[in-house]
Image (tube, helix red, strand yellow):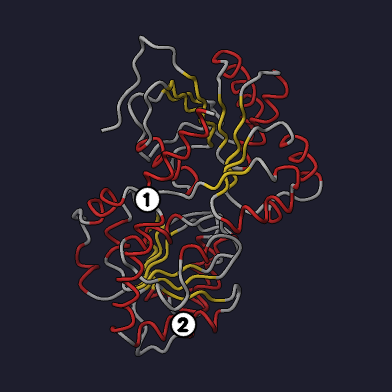
Amino acid sequence: MIPKHDNSIKLKRVCFVSSTMSSGGAERALSNLLCNMDLTGLDIQLLLLNKVITYPIPESVTVVDLRKRSALFLPLCFIFLVFHLVRLRPDVVVSIWSFPSLLTGLALKLTRLKSKWVVRVANNPADQENGVKQRLFHWLYKHASQFIVLCEELQDKFVAYYPFTKNKTILIRNGFNIADLRARSAENIDEQELFAKPYMISVGSFTPQKRYDVLLKAYALIDKKLRIPLILLGDGPLKQELIILAKELGIFSDIIFKGFVKNPYPYVANAKLFVLASDYEGLCNAAIEAQCLGVPAVITDCPTGNREIVEDGETGYLVTIENPAEMADKITKTLKSDELTNRMARSAKLIANEKFKIEKSALSLRKVIEL
């Protein structure tokens, strides 16, 4: 049990700024941290651009809705952000990924608050912060106190892109409560019949970054005698395009579009293989969780982080981005050998459970807040 703060003592006020607390990897990582961090002496305010919550939040955390219901509400959302920062006058402000960091940086500049600003960097900035956007972030990041990066490769790329951050970055991996992960993976769901036969799984939003088109093309290249169903957990703007592509490739009957599910872990834990075709990542929560649950993975060797999740040939395989043939080959190699998948499963659970303990990440975040 995480202790609640004692109102009789002077509390350090900390504001976390996030888009929502639903469906995204950054949001899930924040939920894990808040639920497993020692909150003693802290007054935590969670400022959400849009109050959509599916991930757990500790009772002692106060949620503030900034009311961004669509792009049209963005000016109002920014005004609310400024208002609440001035009202709360936080000691520390932590922004969770690029867009909340953009709004937070502008709000702090406008208000001239002396709050310590900590930026969580979720993806390689070279993939998203170019041209005018790069110059804007460069200007804002000059005023940040510290930057949380998720893996060593991302740390190197971020510092190379913004050299002035060299001595301000700290590595805090996405952490997971392993006992809770296992307990949730053992929960009964209404579709237990799905687990009766082998299948592979991919988890993530249907967005260009995740390259589900590459995954479907790879799947279509697998010999039909070896092919097992592919469950896709997620949703997003490209869903209809992917359904059309699956039909064009003649694989639609073997693809199960499950959409977003509140508890994905029984589906992941019972899978024979986890697959991911992303062009880039920060540190993919879904891939880490699969490894923690002992599921071998075939994922792209994309920037950044995947090399720190999967040990090639030991806990799964890393494949070149945008290469359906190579992905199909590694999936086939894995499916052909139960001995191989069992060995990879044991190694994945052993290595990932040690590397991604939530206790390490939560303690590191607490130290950042206290400095």
Quadrant position of residue 313: bottom left
Q: Is residue 326 above or below residue 125?
A: below
Q: Position of residue 293 (x, y in %)?
A: 31, 61
Tag 1: amino acid: Lys
Q: Position of residue 117 (x, y in %)?
A: 62, 30
Q: Position of residue 250 (x, y in %)?
A: 46, 81
Of residues 288 and 129, the one drawn nearer to the viewer in this rendering:
288
Of residues 328 and 139, the one drawn nearer to the viewer in this rendering:
139
Residue under numbered circle 2: 330
Q: Is residue 272 above or below residue 37?
A: below
Of residues 176 and 216, the one drawn nearer to the viewer in this rendering:
176
Determine which of the numbered discs, if any, sits on residue 321 in the image.
Answer: none
Kindly report the distance in space between the C-alpha atoms of the residues bearing marks 1 and 2: 28 Å
Look at the image and tell me in which quarter the C terminus lies. Answer: top right
**Label located before the other in sequence (1 or 2):** 2
Tag 2: amino acid: Lys
Element type where label 2 sits in the image: helix
Look at the image and tell me in which quarter the N terminus lies. Answer: top left
Please rate how many residues cluster around mark 2, counting C-alpha atoms within 10 Å: few if below 14, some from 14 to 19, many from 20.
many
- Point 34% across, 16% down: residue: 6
Quadrant position of residue 241: bottom right
- Point 72% across, 49% down: residue: 129
- Point 67% across, 27% down: residue: 75
Of residues 325 and 256, the one drawn nearer to the viewer in this rendering:
325
Element type where label 1 sits in the image: loop
Disc tally is 2
Q: Position of residue 344 (x, y in %)?
A: 35, 75
Is label 1 in contact with label 2 (beta carbons under 8 Å)?
A: no
- Point 34% across, 58% down: residue: 353
Residue under numbered circle 1: 357
Q: Is residue 334 above or below residue 102?
A: below
